[in-house]
Image (cartoon, grey):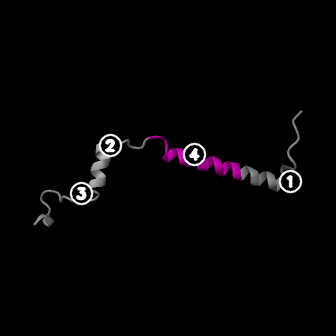
Amino acid sequence: MKPPMPDFLQHPLAREIAVAIAIKLLVIAAIFYAFFDGCAPHPDAGAVAERLANPHPPVQSPPGSSHAD
């Protein structure tokens, strides 16, 4: 025999809202893990120091560009 549902889930609308919230939380968790699954770059200390010392490296134009004049 199944245990009785809590009082707040006795109403059909409350059950639908609870299911909708559960599905939304699962979707949010899936999106989070899709973007943050551990594939982040792990730079070394020297690269971080160089980037902090020179935040805007000079932009080099490609060879043969008309803007190189």
Amino acid identity at mark 2: Ala
Task: Report the side of 31 relative to 43 (left or right).
Answer: right
Amino acid identity at mark 1: His
Please give the name of the residue rendered at 54% of the width and 48% of the height, measured from the top-left corner: 32
Determine whether label 2 and label 4 are within 8 Å by CB: no
Amino acid identity at mark 3: Pro
Specify the principal SS of the magenta part. helix
Residue hosting label 2 = 45
Residue hosting label 1 = 11
Between 27 and 59, the residue placed more toward the observer is 59
Secondary structure category for the residue under label 1: loop
Mark 3, mark 4: which one is toward the viewer? 3
Secondary structure category for the residue under label 2: helix
Query: Residue 8: x and y, percent?
Result: 84, 52
Dot 2, crowdedness within 10 Å: few (<14), some or many (≥20)?
few
Where residue 54 is drawn, which disc sits there? none
In 3D space, how far apart are the residues under numbered discs 3 and 1 (Cα atoms)? 62 Å
- The numbered mark, 2 or 4, whose residue comes first in the sequence reads 4
Magenta segment boundaries in residue numbering? 21-38
Please give the name of the residue rendered at 65% of the width and 49% of the height, measured from the top-left corner: 25
In 3D space, how far apart are the residues under numbered discs 3 and 2 (Cα atoms)? 18 Å
Residue hosting label 4 = 30
* 31 within the magenta span: yes
Residue 1 figure quarter:
top right
